[in-house]
Image (tube, rainbow, N blue to C red):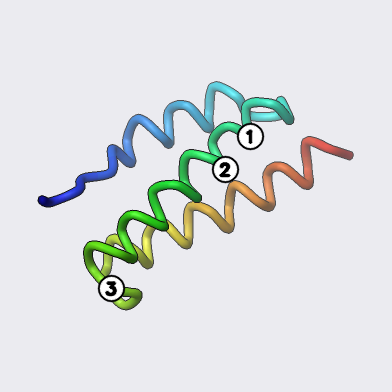
Amino acid sequence: MRLRVDYEALTKHAAKMEGKAEGQQSTQELLERALVIEEREYGPDHPSVILTKTMLGKAHDALREADR
C-alpha cells in the first residue's frame, strides 16, 4: 500500500488556523500520525518523511507562537 499525504490540504489547514492554538495542535497531531505511517512504509530517509518532519517542525514553532 502506498500512502500519500495531502500536503496541500495540510498547508491550507495550517494557514486557516494560523494564530489559533487549537488549530495548530490539530495540524501537529495529523502530521505526527502521518510521520509514523510514512516512516513505517518508506523508512526514515525517504523524501516524504523528511518533508513531513519539516512541516512538523514548523507546526511546533507555530504552536509555540500561538501560545504566547
State the image coordinates of residue 63 (x, y, percent, origin top left). 71, 42
What label does residue 54 carry, if any? none
Give whichever of 15, 21 is nearer the camera: 21
Question: From what the image shows, is residue 64 above or below residue 49?
Answer: above
Residue farthest along the bottom direction in this orientation: 45
State the image coordinates of residue 33 (x, y, percent, origin top left). 44, 47
Q: Which residue is drawn at 60% across and 24% down?
A: 17
Question: From what the image shows, is residue 29 above or below residue 15?
Answer: below
Amino acid type, mark 3: Gly
Q: Quadrant of residue 12?
A: top left
Circle 3 crowding by C-alpha within 10 Å: few under 14, some 14–19, many from 20 = few
State the image coordinates of residue 8 (x, y, percent, origin top left). 32, 35
According to the picture, the residue beneath numbered tag 1 turns out to be 24
According to the picture, the residue beneath numbered tag 3 turns out to be 43
Q: Is mark 1 on a helix, strand or loop?
A: helix
Q: Earlier in the sequence, mark 3 or mark 1?
A: 1
Q: Disc 3 versus disc 1: distance between alpha carbons?
A: 26 Å
Amino acid type, mark 2: Gln
Circle 2 crowding by C-alpha within 10 Å: few under 14, some 14–19, many from 20 = many
According to the picture, the residue beneath numbered tag 2 turns out to be 28
